[in-house]
Amino acid sequence: MDLNKGYYIYTFGCAMNEYDSERISSSLEIRGYHQVLDTREATIIILNTCSVRAKPEIKIASYLGVIAKDLKRNDRDVIIGLTGCVAQDQGKKLLKEFPLVNFVIGTDAVANFDELIERALAGERFVDTSLMTETFVIEKFKRKSKISAQVTIMKGCENFCTYCIVPYVRGVEVSRDVKEITDEIKALIAGGSKEIMLLGQNVNSYRGKLENGSIAGFSDLLGSVNEIAGVERIRFITSHPKDFDKELVDTIAKLDKVCKYIHLPAQSGSNNVLDKMSRCYTVEDYKSKIDYAKSVIPNISFSSDFIIGFPDETEEEFQESLDLIRYVDFDNVFAFKYSSRPGTKAATYKDSLDNATKSRRLAELFALKDEIVTVKLAKLIGKEFEILVSGRSSKDSSQFHGLTEQSRGVAFSSSKDLKLGDMVNVRILEARPNSLLGEEIE
Ligand code: 5AD
Ligand code: SF4
């Protein structure tokens, strides 16, 4: 191993960024670099940034501060790059602000990482935040097949929820052609992938070209992916509730490989707040969509995102979010304190809510979630699940580890020599707060 060819990459944010990081890693590894987990061993350092919440600049600055201290101590030559949403959003400003940084590559230009890294290696300091709406070049990258592989089906978002910076950073919606997606999936499966995670900021808006020139919607795409031999499971993120219609539910019901576990961000349980967020649905709409899905697919379950403390959220409005969480009985809930993003509409809203109140509400929401999840987990004892084997358990190497369709991790015993990617049936024997224990059954 060439000790001068270590690269370090840190990924903030969502699955899109993880996917981009994977592509950057592939590109560097083809060039003979290997990933290191300590910046002090790296000659290329990449921070793949996120701007959806919090003060991103502060995070970058503190990271770069740590790196800078070390470089000064050791007098080393390192190339430092910023990618992701903050890179896209702030571009040139970052090069000016952080003299240590060699390059800034935005969310679209990262598709040309192969060429851009050459420029960086040749000593150039540059910014590329060009947005490419015509082409959606991504497969310039050779990808490693993971058991669960992510595949981007579309990019961008045109919903403009009032709190969200994504439409400004990731641009207009562009969908990849169906064949490009299915070809990529076939290649991943040939390399050993079993589970395919379809990615898009807003997958329901997928409108990709078919070979005959007509347009396929998201339900059509799911159908095509379901037909690919060797695909064991299909997941997708993220769905927008306003587009989560009967057609899509009926499609999910029909397709055996699509996981009956859907992430459907509600954001709030209050109609007034939803309206101020421009989410284009009411709590009643949301509930009736969930009710319909549960009536057609009895074993379906949901997870969701909530924003706490949207400008001037009242105590009643917050309690309505808790009511919705109880109503749906979510398998998992992610919640975030509202964070004002410059340039969005909500950033202009009056916000008199203090931080202590936001923190208290967030804690209350998580306590409710824990309560719901504990009850749910206890009910799983004695039940059987199909598990996709993801390896040996980290705590006990005689045990295997894998995920259920609902993305719950299970550690289990088996008399067989199971391999990564095997599908087995497991009975749950014990439910601990953060883990399930089970045994393989025939
Ligand atoms: N403040 C807090 N949370 C936000 N999210 C998006 N924008 C903001 C913001 N400005 C949350 C939403 C979204 C998730 C990815 O991040 O809940 O679903
Ligand atoms: Fe942001 Fe709304 Fe688009 Fe999701 S749907 S990325 S929350 S604007």
Image (tube, rainbow, N blue to C red):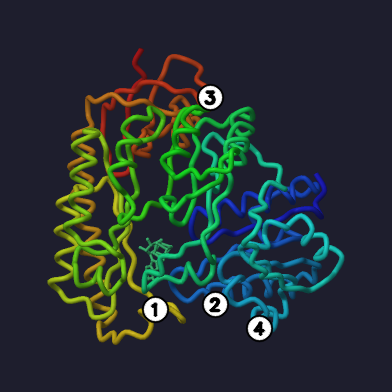
Residue holding disc 2: 57
Residue of label 1? 340
Q: Is residue 340 left or right of residue 6?
A: left
Give the CA separation, mark 2 to mark 4. 10 Å
Q: Is mark 1 on a helix, strand or loop?
A: loop
Precedes in sequence: disc 4 or disc 1: 4
Per the model, the C-alpha gap separating discs 4 and 1 is 22 Å
Looking at the image, residue 259 lies above or below residue 274: above
Cβ atoms under marks 2 and 4 closer than 8 Å: yes
Given residues 6 and 132, the one toward you in this image is: 132
Q: Which residue is drawn at 17% across and 42% down?
A: 375
Residue type at numbered disc 2: Glu
Q: Secondary structure beneath disc 4?
A: helix
Residue 230, numbered circle: 3
Residue 153 image offset from top left, x and y in percent: 53, 48
Q: Position of residue 230 (x, y in %)?
A: 53, 24
133 vs 77, nearest the viewer:
133
